[in-house]
Image (cartoon, rainbow, N blue to C red):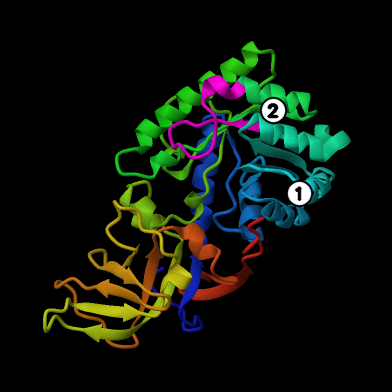
Amino acid sequence: MNVIPAAVRTPAVMIDVDILDRNIQRMADNMQGRGLNLRPHVKTHKTLEIARKQLAAGAVGITVATIGEAEVFAADGVKDIFIAYPLWVEADHADRLRALAATSRLAVGVDSAEGATAMGHQLGSDAGSVEVLIEVDSGHHRSGVLPDETVDVARAAAAAGLKVAGVFTFPGHSYKPGMPTGAAGNENEALGQAAAALESASFEVRTISGGSTPTALLDGPTAATELRPGVYVFGDAQQLELERCAWDDIALTVAATVVSRHEARGGNVRRVVVDAGSKVLGSDRPDWATGYARLPEFPEARVTALSEHHATVVWPDSDELPALGTRLRVIPNHVCLTMNLVDEVSVVRDGAVVDTWAVAARGRNS
């Protein structure tokens, strides 16, 4: 999709539905071919229509980051939800978890004996209605216990009345150049060790959950029974620069208008400014990224600075500097942030807007 439909007012998020559908089906086919369950992380898109497409393509359920996200998708009829986060549960959280467990199979992450004990205490006699997966640190060094600490957490969870269902991890260190393959190996080793430790302690391990978009499609053995990629539905500039997707795999772009242009004079660089700043693109820029965003029609251009409503694009000498009013497509670095910054998205096909989708779980951060 190289055309921004006339009906789109910039800045605006556009989703090419044909590319979206292709990305969804490719991942579903890959998981099915490898005998793995697919449980996509819907915090990426926060959109009911896309979750429906993922489930229709064969996903066994969804992954969310918060209770609020779970509530939005459960209200739309999703019956199998994993909150992949080490929740600290207080009384109000427990009430909401009870309500979710009454309509959906519900699993929750935990990474400490204290967290498991608190969850069980707050849920009381309903503790058995919620499954828990022990989070394992496979090299990202964020949350999660080391594999040899898994049994202690599981025992605390079981003593609190919770159902221990297995283990999970997030190989977040895959989001660096040259790291996806190594991170996948770390994930496989950590999950295998943690699952074996639980089984040796007489726990039944039903779920071994891993995965990220950079690692999900890599060949090779895995200890996981299910994977939880999220960004794959859209792709973004990070995935491009990690070589985990191609330009033709990018389903989400931001339509923007050139509002300022400058040739290289007086020591200034050759540049344009577009009206899509950090309030629609997000402001993530890993230290290895070449900019804050990319332009699919101009691969050599780089977004070098963001303000709230400005994106500064250094323009290559090989291309004519766009005129004021020119409309350009921009690929965000981190697409998950972009979806949480807008209320709705324009769904496009063949250069025309064919639908509008609400970002139903936007802002549901707790």
Q: Is residue 16 visible?
A: no
- Measured Cα–Cα span from mark 2 to mark 1: 20 Å
Q: Amino acid at mark 1?
A: His
Residue depicted at x 48% and y 56%: 234
**Magenta stretch contains residue 112:** no
Q: Quadrant of residue 203?
A: top right
Q: Secondary structure at mark 2?
A: strand
Residue furthest to the front in view is: 114
Q: Is residue 11 above or below residue 238?
A: below
Quadrant of image for the C terminus: bottom right
| Left or right: 88 as drawn, with respect to 283 | right
| Left or right: 286 as drawn, with respect to 79 | left
Residue 316's tag is none
Residue depicted at x 72% and y 28%: 157
Q: Quadrant of residue 109?
A: top right
Magenta region: 133-150
Q: Nearer the viewer, residue 56 or 328?
A: 328
Q: Is residue 160 above or below residue 51?
A: above
Q: Main secondary structure of the magenta part?
A: loop
Q: Which residue is mark 2?
A: 165
In percent of width and height, residue 60 lies at: 66, 40
Q: Is residue 150 visible?
A: yes
| Left or right: 40 as drawn, with respect to 171 | right
Q: Which residue is mark 1?
A: 93
